[in-house]
Image (tube, coloured by chain):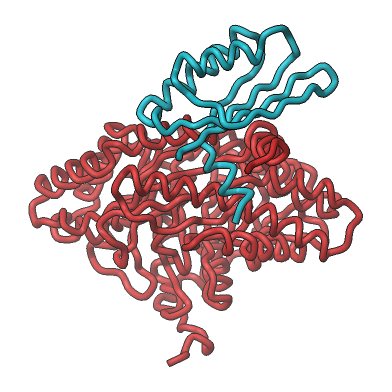
Chain colours: A red, B cyan
Amino acid sequence: MLNMFEVIETNNMIEQEKLDVRTITLGISLLDCCDSDLDAVNEKIYKRITTVARDLVSTGAAIEREFGIPIVNKRISVTPIALVGGAACKTPEDFVTIAKTLDRAAKEVGVNFIGGYSALVCKGMTKAEENLIRSIPQALACTERVCSSVNVGSTKTGINMDAVNLMGTIVKETAEATKEVDSLGCAKLVVFCNAPDDNPFMAGAFHGVTEADAVINVGVSGPGVVKVALEKARGQNFEVLCETIKKTAFKITRVGQLVAQEASKRLGVPFGIIDLSLAPTPAVGDSVAEILEEIGLERVGAPGTTAALAMLNDQVKKGGVMASSYVGGLSGAFIPVSEDQGMIDAVTLGALTIEKLEAMTCVCSVGLDMIAIPGDTAATTIAGIIADEAAIGMVNQKTTAVRIIPVIGKGVGDTVEFGGLLGYAPVMPVNPYSCEKFVTRGGRIPAPIHSFKN
Amino acid sequence: MSKAIITVVGKDTVGIIARVCTYLADNQINILDISQTIVQGYFNMMMIVDITGAQERFGDLVEGIEKLGGEIGVRIKCQKEEIFTSMHRI
């Protein structure tokens, strides 16, 4: 039978160490909403989402109340819209109508984000996919809850450099289109390499074409719990350190597994995966940077940061994998700058640079995330940053991504306030030398030699 | 059997257990186990209760008992047992 010590430990994790379930994301396939008539597509999409997700928010709230664990976000991911709207949308403006429909459906069912305004163009772009990509700046400017992502490369196909170059321009245009709100649109736009089909985290969530009609994916969190556990292992060797992280990750993930199973049972939707990521928030004590500092770095960004992060990421996975029957999504430690107080402090002090963040993305999940850069950064330079990240993902057979915000009207030394879970960020300097001739060559970078495994 | 864990934490005062038990009795909830201790004047109690017959109205029970805690001046939480067993038992 349970003892008081165990009960208090769990409740301390929730109340003092900010353990929560970060998101229950309901993936919905919209493939059966395809139609050649634009109005019909919009109507089918709205009906399908509002029917399947009708009870998502109330079910999440009930689980939250009964188990006493906060479930911060309830969200929806849908089939990449470039596929769903391909037959009906002849222009970027046509696609914008679907973005508005998604936004309306999200508001109707009460979710705070809906992901899947996406195109998968890792090898080539269809006309419809190009139209969707070109519609992104307008779509993100005229909606509140829609999130967009584009997959521009993979280990199997190489990198679509035409798409990379286009995305440099699109990120810049999105920043311009939302300049009234500090270019916030870019916080809802992710450029991926090796994008997973079952990621529950925004802004990069979409419901992959290999998925079933509907599926529940859950993202757990808990950097604060890991940090407090590590405080008790100060001065100990790596064996003790790794054991502590693994045990903590196991406990955190078990909670996610429980919530996922409950949600799946109550909604009558199959359980997909648990995403093991440590996802920080701007709240003090909910930071991945603080974990790295607890491990022994004076500031995140100091020499040793990449090694510490590699170890952390690996131990989180090892502990988490045993706690869940299915693990997927991104699963690792997130290092978004604006959403992590420790990262923000390190950038302000000059301890952490974009180049160091890039190195860190080689060993953790995702990539350059929520980084504010000067608004006058050239589109081709942004494309170069995307190409670098995609290359890291392609060669290392992992997911990488870029969510970067060129803040129009601001430069190095300024701070940008995004609000809520998105936090705030100091504008970081970018290498001023051009890569224009490189990114505008056109065509693809071929897949690396080690992808040929057949 | 379906179980829930009730935890009570707060400054010690007369009649905490009595009032919590009365509330549970009024709601036909059977108590299976109680452990209680005082640490530096602070009251800590954990109860394991049977909620098999109260599944439908469990949400109301959680709210009701939290409200009772407010009246007594202590913090009371009622959570389904699985959150603890999933974390601490393989």
Does residue B50 show up? Answer: yes
Work out whether residue A381 or residue A218 is closer to the camera in this orientation and state it.
A218
Does residue A370 show up? Answer: no
Please tell me in which quadrant of the rendered image residue A359 appears: bottom right
Q: Establish if A78 lies above or below B59.
A: below
Is A53 left or right of A359, judged from the image as shown? left
Q: Position of residue A375 (x, y in %)?
A: 55, 45
Work out whether residue B6 or residue A247 is closer to the camera in this orientation and state it.
B6
Residue placed farthest to the right in the image? A235
**Quadrant for the C terminus of chain A in the image:** bottom left
Work out whether residue A175 or residue A303 is closer to the camera in this orientation and state it.
A303
Please tell me in which quadrant of the rendered image residue A99 appears: top left
Q: Position of residue B61 (x, y in %)?
A: 46, 21
Is A130 left or right of B73, judged from the image as shown? left
Residue at 43 percent of width and 80 percent of height: A156
Residue at 31 percent of width and 63 percent of height: A211
Residue at 49 percent of width and 48 percent of height: A258
Work out whether residue A287 or residue A443 is closer to the camera in this orientation and state it.
A287
Q: Establish if A34 lies above or below A288.
A: below
Is A83 left or right of A391, judged from the image as shown? left
Residue placed farthest to the bottom in the image? A454
